[in-house]
Amino acid sequence: MDTQIHPDLKSILVSQQELSKIVDDIADKINKDYKNEEIIMIVILRGSMVFSADLLRRLKMPVKLEFMQASSYGSGTSSSGFINIKRDLDADITGKNVLIIEDIIDSGNTLFRLKNVLESRNPKSCHICTLLDKPDRRVTPVDVTYVGKVIPDEFVVGYGLDYNEYYRNLPYIGVLKKEIYE
């Protein structure tokens, strides 16, 4: 059962129970698609950390874990259009199955650039998995293989997603009140 709603939120958009079901469903699809094949799971820090940890525990194939950190937001609520890769991979992904794990796709700018960078390193395959998708905000088209939930154009936090580095620890995803970020 969800805990009491945080006072900075106007509503809970995705409950703990729904999050668990979403992660189960995505894991089932990945397990089917990559049966008996190794994958390199590339976690996009920091927002994807919680989702990635839950997903990782449900995967049945051999998984290697890598991390990248990229940002197009800074402390704002909309993409700046500039992509900053703050942390790159340690591993060589040549000839490997790569699965990029993202928390939310908004404008598409970050994922478009990251996927192009990774594909230039000649992986066997390169697919994107996102917990949340906001297609109404899309500026750059992005091919996403695994989508947990399509959400409306609201500013959401919790379950790893933040505003100004806060709210990541909420066990659900909620809609942040406008007066908090405006």
Image (cartoon, rainbow, N blue to C red):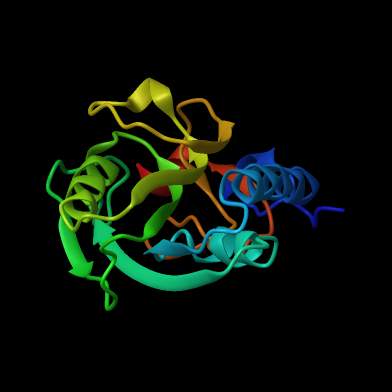
User: Relative to 83, does residue 156 appear above or below in the rendering?
Assistant: above
Residue 74 in the image: x percent, y percent?
24, 57
Residue lying at 40% horizontally and 56% vertically, measured from the top left? 97
Q: Position of residue 20 (x, y in %)?
A: 75, 51
Name, please, the residue furthest toward the right: 1
On screen, residue 68 above or below 101: below
Question: Camera-side residue: 87 or 176?
Answer: 87
Which of these two is toward me, 50 or 173? 50
Image position of 26 (left or right of 103): right
Residue 9 in the figure: left or right of residue 116: right
Q: Is residue 180 left or right of residue 170?
A: left
Residue 111's image quarter? top left
Q: How many marks?
A: 0
Of the pair 19 and 146, the residue shown nearer to us: 146
Q: Residue furthest left?
A: 82
Tell me the residue at 42%/63% (across/down): 43
Which of 88/70 is in front?
A: 88
Instruction: Residue 177 in the image: state x and y as whole percent.
Output: 52, 41
Which residue in the rendered view is the most extreme toward the bottom?
A: 90
> Residue placed at 29% from the left, 34% from the top?
107
> Residue at the location (18% across, 58% down)?
121
Q: Residue 154: x, y in percent?
A: 48, 32
Q: Is residue 38 above or below residue 119?
A: below
Figure quadrant of the C terminus: top left
